[in-house]
């Protein structure tokens, strides 16, 4: 996974929530994986947080073992803040609670290189797809 951005160098650390108008978000330049045989591609736009991405990574690693190369193509680059539950109005914006990755439709999320049989890889990828909160599909590239 890509590292979190260095927010100590940002002028404003707590950003506004973007307008998640997901009907307009489509990523045309990331339709095919760059270097691998298999990929997981987002069909619909959405947001993915660290726990969902980590559970997807664990499912892939358990099924494919240490031999397979797994490359995540998205980064958790957007902070979301939240105020405490029992706080009153005012006194500024809440602290950063977690980071999310804003994913557009068509974006490659994970690329995988493995020499295992296709049937086994499809089973593992379907388990990993169930961990993500958005609709995704499996891509198989023939070189």
Image: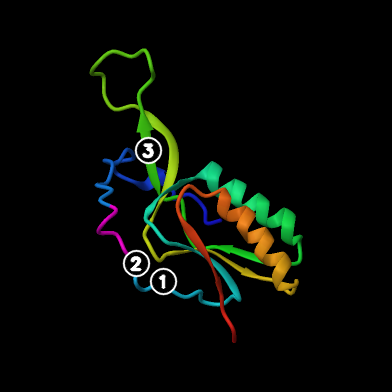
From what the image shows, is residue 62 above or below residue 112?
above
Please name the residue shown 24% across and 47% down the image.
19
In the picture provided, is 25 more to the left or to the right than 102?
left
| Pointer 2 residue | 27
| Pointer 3 residue | 80
Q: What element carries label 3?
A: strand
Magenta residue check for 2: no
Q: Tell me the chief SS of the magenta region.
A: loop
In the picture provided, is 61 more to the left or to the right than 6?
right
Return the x and y of residue 134 as percentages of the image width and height: 45, 51
Please name the residue shown 73% across and 65% down the image.
120
Count of numbered tags: 3
- Quadrant into which the C terminus falls: bottom right
The label number, if any, that marks residue 5 in the structure image: none
Q: How crowded is mark 1: few (under 14 residues within 10 Å), some or many (20 or more)?
A: some
From what the image shows, is residue 100 above or below residue 65?
above
Label 2 to label 3, Cα distance in Å?
A: 23 Å
Q: What element carries label 2?
A: loop
| Pointer 1 residue | 30
Q: How crowded is mark 3: few (under 14 residues within 10 Å), some or many (20 or more)?
A: some
Return the x and y of residue 55 as percentages of the image width and height: 61, 46
Q: Are marks 1 and 3 in contact (CB under 8 Å)?
A: no
Q: Are marks 1 and 2 in contact (CB under 8 Å)?
A: yes
Label 1 to label 2, Cα distance in Å?
A: 6 Å
Return the x and y of residue 30 as percentages of the image width and height: 41, 71
**First-in-chain label (2 vs 3):** 2
Which of these two is toward me, 119 or 102? 119
Magenta residue span: 22-27
Q: What element carries label 1?
A: loop
Return the x and y of residue 51 as percentages of the image width and height: 55, 42
Which of these two is toward me, 43 or 37? 43
């Amino acid at each position: 996974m890509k590292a979190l951005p260095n927010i100590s160098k940002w002028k404003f650390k707590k950003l506004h929530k973007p307008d998640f108008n997901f009907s307009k978000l489509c990523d045309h330049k990331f339709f095919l994986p760059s270097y691998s045989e298999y990929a997981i591609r987002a069909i619909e736009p959405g947001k993915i947080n660290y726990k969902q991405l980590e559970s997807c990574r664990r499912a892939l690693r358990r099924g494919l073992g240490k031999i397979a190369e797994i490359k995540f193509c998205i980064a958790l680059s957007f902070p979301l803040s939240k105020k405490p539950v029992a706080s009153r109005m005012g006194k500024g914006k809440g602290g950063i609670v977690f980071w999310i990755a804003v994913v557009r439709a068509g974006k490659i999320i994970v690329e995988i290189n493995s020499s295992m049989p296709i049937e086994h890889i499809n089973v593992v990828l379907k388990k990993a797809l169930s961990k993500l909160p958005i609709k995704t599909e499996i891509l198989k590239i023939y070189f």
